[in-house]
Image (tube, grey):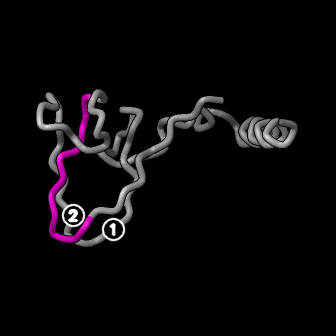
Amino acid sequence: MNEITPHVVTLNADQSYQICQCGRCSSAPFAADNCPRSLNLHSDQKQLVWLCSCGRSEAMPYCDGSHNPRNKMSIREAIREMAQDLLSHFRK
């Protein structure tokens, strides 16, 4: 399964960041100077955050897990699929 993962970054206290929302910046999750859709994010404290990289989060710019295809599965289906993924990893 090809899963999209969030950008895990440390934000420093009292610092502002421009976060790319267009999905094309090579410096993602941070916006390039010419990014057509950047979002200003200010951090009041030093903190580790997960920033969305799939564009589906309802809590932008933060990841809310919307990228995970297992979110719409029943618990039984998700556990079965995760077990299959784990077994295939060990069979390699």
Of 80 and 88, nearer the camera is: 88
Looking at the rendered structure, the kind of residue marked 1 is: Gln
Tell me what residue is drawn at x 82 percent, y 36 percent.
88
Q: Position of residue 36 (x, y in %)?
A: 14, 28
Q: Is residue 47 above or below residue 9?
A: below
Marks 2 and 1 close (CB-CB < 8 Å): yes
Q: Quadrant of residue 84?
A: top right
Tell me what residue is drawn at x 40 percent, y 53 percent.
50
Name of the residue lying farthest toward the right: 91
Q: Is residue 66 above or below residue 2?
A: below
Crowding at dot 2, Cα within 10 Å, few <14 / some 14-19 / many 20+, comes out as some
Q: Name the residue beneath numbered marker 2.
A: 43
In the visual, does 90 lie left or right of 35?
right
Magenta-highlighted residues: 12-22
Looking at the rendered structure, the kind of residue marked 2 is: Ser
Q: Position of residue 44 (x, y in %)?
A: 19, 69
Disc 2 is placed on an element classified as: strand
Residue 16 is one of the magenta-drawn residues? yes
Q: Quadrant of residue 73?
A: top right
Q: Quadrant of residue 10?
A: bottom left
Q: Name the residue beneath numbered marker 1.
A: 47
In the visual, does 58 lie left or right of 39?
right
Residue 23 is one of the magenta-drawn residues? no
Tell me what residue is drawn at x 25 percent, y 34 percent.
21
Of 39 and 77, nearer the camera is: 39
Q: Position of residue 39 (x, y in %)?
A: 18, 42
In the visual, does 50 lie left or right of 37?
right
The disc label shown at residue 21, or none: none
Q: Position of residue 72 (x, y in %)?
A: 60, 33
Disc 1 is placed on an element classified as: strand
